[in-house]
Amino acid sequence: MFDFLRRSNRPARPRRPRPVARHNRRLAGEALEPRLCLSAASVMMFSAMPTNNGTQVTLSGMVMDERPANVVLTFSGVAAGSVSPNAQGQFSLVTTASGVGQVTAIAVDDESFSSNPAYAYVMNAVPSVSMLSVGETGNGRWVTVSGNVMDEVSSGRTVTFGGVVSGTAVTGSGGAFSVSLEASALGTVTATTVDPWGQTSAVKQATLSSGVPSLSIGVSEVAGGKVAVSGTVNDMTKAGLTITIGGVASGTATTNSSGYFSVTLDASALGTVTATTQDVWGQGSNVAQASFTSIAPEIIAFTGTWVEGTTWLFTGTVCDVSPVGLTVVFSGAISGQTTTGANGAFAFYFNVPHGTFEDAGAQVTDIWGLESQIAEFFVAFA
């Protein structure tokens, strides 16, 4: 018991620490040992660029990985395929795209670790139609439509037309196009094109217009109460136009390739002759007018000759466009009437009494009612 008391009164001895520090040092030493920590590949600088050869695109970029040459990239979206980079991680693949839009790239390394998706976009400018024009060819309703297509590759593009024409044209070098088409009427012509990506251009418009035809005429008298009507049409299409004639003559005529026409028609009287036409688009011309006139007839070489007894023969000739069949009326020393024959000649027998010293007169009226001057011959019959 005293020993116990002696021990308990002694100052407490410091405890020796447990060998925990040595254990912690061992753990810390292990943490400092080199460890191989593998990570998935990553896709850098990924792009998708059209090659301007149809819908081909180049998919290119770079892969970051411990062994990039062992990585396989797989593409999906509007362009598909796969490729492995070179030793520096660079890759490039030419493939065909289904259209514009997104392409996704995923890299898988040789440890089967997949990268996060990388995205690129196939983009292409929409084509456009420019300098669209339309004009008459001078051959009926056939017109020439021309213009230009603007695109990355502008040759070989199909241009589709609508509006008052229908058809297509294919662009040549530089995107130019020109085609002849038949129009249904005057109005708007439209043109569009589609690029290989299926992108449609904006609708380009041009207006087909035409000046109204211009008509001029002249008239002249023809024997037999007829009138010759002739003239010229000034228009883009001159041939085959129908001329409608009215006024004191009625009928139609057709223009030749120069726009000229001529027709002979029965005239109802002297007066105004009119003419109109329509072009191939149905546009009416001006109303052309000409005055149909005639010169009054004239009796020439009127003379009297004694035949026998009291019989005298009076002769003469009527000068006129239509001299045949006209009635010559006599006056003065003689009276009566006769009818002109061929070339307007006439002859009239009359019994003149002895002791006649007087003028014999002759007058004629033409088919239009125009009277000649009175032709006179002095009769001296003792």
Image: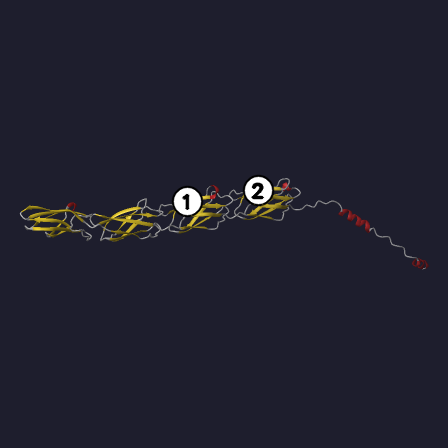
Residue depicted at 79% across the width and 50% down the height: 24
Could you tell me how far apart the alpha carbons at marks 1 and 2 are, in whole angstroms? Answer: 40 Å
The single residue placed furthest to the left in the displayed view is 309
Q: Left or right: where does residue 34 sit relative to residue 313?
A: right
Q: How far across and down, in percent of the image, does residue 277 sit?
A: 31, 51
Q: Nearer the viewer, residue 14 or 333?
A: 333
**Quarter residue 35 falls in:** top right
Q: Left or right: where does residue 145 sit relative to residue 361?
A: right
Q: How far across and down, in percent of the image, does residue 360 sit?
A: 11, 50
Q: Mark 2: few, some, or many residues within 10 Å (few <14, many ≥20)? A: some
Q: Which residue is mark 2?
A: 93
Q: Nearer the viewer, residue 113 or 41?
A: 41
Q: Which residue is mark 1?
A: 179
SS state under label 1: strand
Q: Amino acid at mark 2?
A: Leu
**Is residue 345 visible to us here?**
no
SS state under label 2: strand
Residue depicted at 59% across the width and 42% down the height: 92
Residue depicted at 46% across the width and 43% down the height: 176
